[in-house]
Image (spheres, coloured by chain):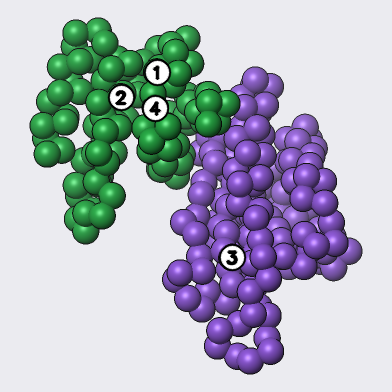
Chain colours: A purple, B green
Amino acid sequence: MANTLKTYLDAVRASLEACLCLTTFPSQQVERHNKPEIEVQSSKELLLTPLVVARNEDEKVLIESSVNSVRISLKIKQMDGMDQLLAHWFCRFLMQRAEQFIVLRRKAVDGFDLSFLITNTNLEKMWKHKLIDFVITFMEEVDKE
Amino acid sequence: EVAQRAAEVEGLIASKKPMKAVAASLNRPPLSVPSQEIKDDNFRVVMRAMAAVREAKIKDCVEGLDDAQCDTLMKYVYRAMEEGISLSSMLKWHAHCLSKG
C-alpha cells in the first residue's frame, strides 16, 4: 500500500515538473488582459493534452496545462458514506479559504474533489519545487487520514 | 498496418519474447491518422504487449528501447492511466521510463 503511494506520488511529481513550465501570455481576445488560458480555453493551440495519473479507480490526479496556467484536480479515496461526507466537508472548508492558499481553486473540477490553479504569476513569486512539494505533501497528508 | 503489427506482437508474445513484442508495438505509432478506431486498436496492441512483460522484467524492457520508443511508451502509459487499465504496473512503467529519459 505504501509502496504504490510512493510510485504514485513520484509519477505525479514528475508530471508536475514537466507541466509547470509557464510563461506569461497576454490574452489574444482582449487587449491588455492576461487570463489563465486553462480557465478561459480561448484557443486550442494554447492548451496541452490533459494527463491523468491514477493509482486506482478512486484516487487520481488530472493535470490540465496550458501556456500560462495549470489546473491540478485531485480525487480523494472515499471508501464509504462516512468517508465521502468527511472528504466533502474537508474540501469545502479548504475551498472557502482558497484565498489564503493562493493556488487553490474555489470550485473543484467536475468529478474531482479538489482543484489547484497555478499560474505564471504564482510561479514568479514562489519556487516551483516548493510548490510541487506542497501539492505532494498535501496528497500524502490526505492519504494518511 | 495495425493488423500486421498485432499479428507480429502476438507472435513474439507466443514465442516468449515479450520485450521484443513491446519494442515492435511501439514502432511507427499512428500519429496523424484521423481515425480514432485505428488509434484504439494500436493502443490495445501496445497494452497486450506490455501486459505480457513480467514486473521484474519491466526495467530491462525499458532499457532496451530507444528514445523515440520510450517517448511513445510514456504516451501510452498516460493513456492507460486515463482509461484506468492495470494502474499499478503502469506506475512502474512510468517510473522506469522516467529514469531512462
Q: Could you give the CA–CA distance between mark 1 and mark 2, rounded to whole angstroms?
A: 8 Å
Q: Closer to the camera: disc 3 or disc 4?
A: 4
Q: Amino acid at mark 4?
A: Asp
Measuring 11% from the left and 32% from the top, which residue is drawn there?
Answer: B4
Q: Amino acid at mark 2?
A: Ala
Judging by the rendered image, the residue that carries numbered circle 1 is B64
Label 2 crowd bin: few (<14), some (14–19), many (20+), radius 10 Å: many
Left or right of residue A9: residue B78 = left
Q: Quadrant of residue B84?
A: top left
Task: Read off the chain for label 3.
Answer: A
The label number, if any, that marks residue B66 in the structure image: 4
Q: Are marks 4 and 2 on the same chain?
A: yes
Kindly indicate whether the residue at mark 4 contacts the one at mark 1 (C-beta within 8 angstroms). Answer: no
The label number, if any, that marks residue A67 in the structure image: 3
Measuring 68% from the left and 86% from the top, which residue is drawn there?
Answer: A33
Residue B18 position within the rendered picture, expressed as x and y whole percent measured from the top left: 29, 15
Q: Quadrant of residue A45?
A: bottom left
Task: Read off the chain for label 4.
Answer: B
